[in-house]
Image: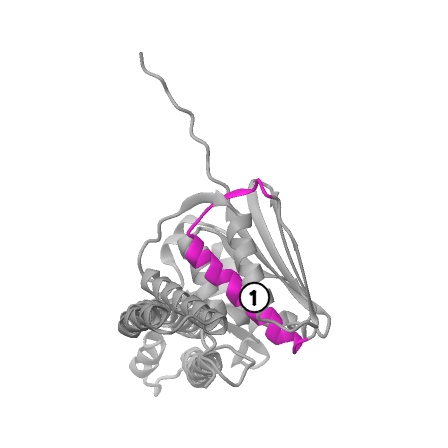
Amino acid sequence: MNLYRQQSTWRLMLIIGALLIVSASLWYTNHLAKDIARSEQKKVELWANANKNLYQADDNTDLNFLFDVIKNNQSVPVILTNEENEILAWRNLDSVKVKNNDTYLAERLREMKKNKAPLQIEYYEGSYIYIYYEDSILLKQLRYYPFVQLGIIGLFLFVAYLSFSTVKSAEQNQVWVGMAKETAHQLGTPISSLVAWVEYLKDHLPEDTSKEEIITELGKDVDRLELIADRFSKIGSKPKLEEIQLVQPLEKTFHYIKRRSSDRVHFKMDVPENLKVQINAPLFEWVLENLLKNALDAMDGSGSIEMIAFEENNKTIVEIKDSGKGIASSKFKTVFQPGYSTKKRGWGLGLTLTKRIIEQYHGGKIFVKNSEIDKGTTFRIELPKKKKTNKIRIS
């Protein structure tokens, strides 16, 4: 089961859900804004007709009704002008600005002319007045509401995603640590038993060179199991870093993998003998093993593996280059995700553990430096150099 694919599917579903929510919200808000705009236009038309009837009123006209209609417009800003463009009246504008700024009404009138055509009223034959208007504050706010809502939804999804990722990461860490500790614990009993059996065979089997070699190799495999159990026991605990010659773990791991690989794989190592680093040797050897095994898997038993080390920009660099299948550039970061694997067997945790050991336990970095399909891949490890401290003598 590809856990990375499950995570990608979950993210895609979250994005699709968010887009559907936003789309539905935008559609509904836009629909509501159009309804309010039509309602306001009808309100202005009613207000205009009331003004027209007021100008044409006779003794039989109900003036109270017309005044009520005019006063009931409490939201739509309007300006009334004559044919000479002189402002006759206004409503629902900022009265303080009208009083203190002589150009305020003229500026608002220009804005209204740009946005909407005026309503024309013939108050007697051949003479007209014009009513200019604009959207109410409520309608303007409603038009901006989808963008505010989009921002709120986006912020909510971002916070929810961060929270979920943090909780999920913490849970994964607890599961990993628990699994590693339990694995080390479960290995302890059979390993102890195997150690005892190896010692028993040494003492009780008759002397035979071929059998001694078998017992020796069996002892090496038991030592290997003890090393693996020790590595798992260190997961979740703060490892002790020691300053050692880098060539020691590199040579040890390099030759271990080389002895167990095909003769058709060419190995090359270039590591200075005087290069010192602060590492936890068992965990760092685990990192190298994972990278070298991945390189072997990528070559199908034939090719070349090169490991080099050097100093650069106050960092210690280790690079492992293979001539295998290569990795697509879009997968450079994906390969370190839990569950990602191109193999049918395994959980896809090797490179994830490698990244954890280098970055969390050693304060370094590991990444795919470069890769080409069917040409090979180079993994790069960067370890920080130990900072030198000046000793202060107090006399």
From this view, report whether residue 390 is shown above or below residue 262: above
User: Closest to the observer: 387 or 45?
Assistant: 387
In the rendering, at what x and y percent does residue 197 appear? 31, 73
Q: Which residue is mark 1?
A: 257
How many numbered circles are shown?
Answer: 1
State whether the magenta stretch is mostly helix, strand or loop. Answer: helix
User: Closest to the observer: 167 or 374?
Assistant: 374
Identified at 57% across, 70% down, the residue is 260
Quadrant of the frame with the C terminus: top left
Visual colour scheme: one colour
Identified at 55% across, 67% down, the residue is 333
Identified at 47% across, 56% down, the residue is 284
Membership of 359 in magenta stretch: no
Query: Which residue ends up furthest to the right in the rendered image?
Result: 375
User: Closest to the observer: 350 or 90?
Assistant: 350
Q: Is residue 84 visible?
A: no
Q: Is residue 333 visible?
A: yes
From this view, report whether residue 277 is shown above or below residue 388: below
User: Closest to the observer: 266 or 116?
Assistant: 266
- How many neighbours does mark 1 have within 10 angstroms: few (below 14), some (14-19), or many (20 or more)? some
> Which amino acid does the dot numbered 1 rest on?
Ile
Task: Give the extent of the magenta segment.
Answer: 273-301
Task: Report which quarter residue 368 is drawn in.
Answer: bottom right
Membership of 284 in magenta stretch: yes
In the rendering, at what x and y percent does residue 263 appear? 68, 71
Query: Which residue ends up furthest to the top in the rendered image?
Result: 395
In the rendering, at what x and y percent does residue 1 appear? 45, 86
Identified at 47% across, 63% down, the residue is 354
Task: Report which quarter residue 175 is drawn in.
Answer: bottom left
In the rendering, at what x and y percent does residue 296 appear? 61, 72
Could you say whether the residue bearing mark 1 is in a helix, strand or loop?
Answer: helix
Task: Report which quarter residue 275 is drawn in.
Answer: top right
